[in-house]
Image (cartoon, grey):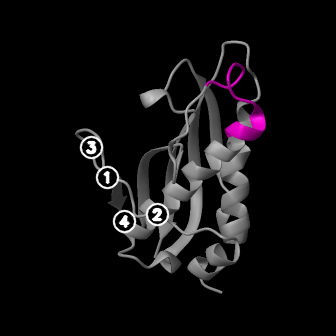
Amino acid sequence: MSIENKLADMGVVLPDASTPAANYVPFVQVGDIIYVSGQISRDSNGLITGKLGDSMDVAAGAAAARTCGIGLLAQVRAACDGDLDRLVRVIKLTAFVNSTADFTDQPKVVNGASDFLVEALGEAGRHARSAVSAASLPLGVSVEIEGIFQIR
């Protein structure tokens, strides 16, 4: 089954890849590796904002992280000229969680993206990962995640 068909079965429609808001590119390809710039939490209603440990709970944070995973796949699809089936595997995610100083469940939040990628891609979605706290993130978003992917 194609990745796009699997996503459709999951009820996920990838958005168009977002464009950079500053002087950087959305992804860089080096050989068969794609480095995707940080994708911020957003859905069809706009930015998902809030601070974990204050105005947002872990479940809402995980849902926000899932949207970052969707954004990452949208960028990979763009990097692959629209053919997401060129994706070989997710190598690594680096995630930033907008959270209070005493919040320690960043990994549970980032599971929203990790679980989504494994559900969508199977073993190819398993990856190395970092999940760290940030005092604030651009535009007040809850989560930002960057990724490294292998393609063919």
Classify 20 as above or below 101. Answer: below
Q: Nearer the viewer, mark 1 or mark 3?
A: 1
In the image, residue 53 lies at what x, y percent? 72, 21
Q: Amino acid at mark 2?
A: Pro
Which residue position holds label 3?
Answer: 24
Secondary structure category for the residue under label 2: loop
- Measured in 3D between alpha carbons, the distance from the residue under mark 4 to the one under mark 2, in whole angstroms, is 26 Å
Q: Quadrant of residue 11?
A: bottom right
- Measured in 3D between alpha carbons, the distance from the residue under mark 1 to the one under mark 4, in whole angstroms, is 22 Å
The residue furthest bottom is 1
Q: Nearer the viewer, mark 4 or mark 2?
A: 2
Q: Tell which circle, 3 or 4, labels the residue nearer the N-terminal end.
A: 3
The residue furthest left is 23
In the image, residue 66 lies at what x, y percent? 64, 51
Classify 72 as above or below 129. Answer: below
Which residue sits at x=58%, y=60%? 90
Q: Which residues are magenta?
A: 51-61
- Measured in 3D between alpha carbons, the distance from the residue under mark 3 to the one under mark 4, in whole angstroms, is 19 Å
Which residue position holds label 1?
Answer: 19
Q: Amino acid at mark 1?
A: Thr
Callout 2 crowding tier (Cα within 10 Å): few <14, some 14–19, many ≥20: few
Which residue sits at x=63%, y=77%? 8
- Measured in 3D between alpha carbons, the distance from the residue under mark 2 to the one under mark 3, in whole angstroms, is 20 Å
Q: Are marks 4 and 2 in contact (CB under 8 Å)?
A: no
In the image, residue 144 lies at what x, y percent? 52, 38
Which residue position holds label 2?
Answer: 15
In the image, residue 148 lies at what x, y percent? 50, 54
Callout 3 crowding tier (Cα within 10 Å): few <14, some 14–19, many ≥20: few
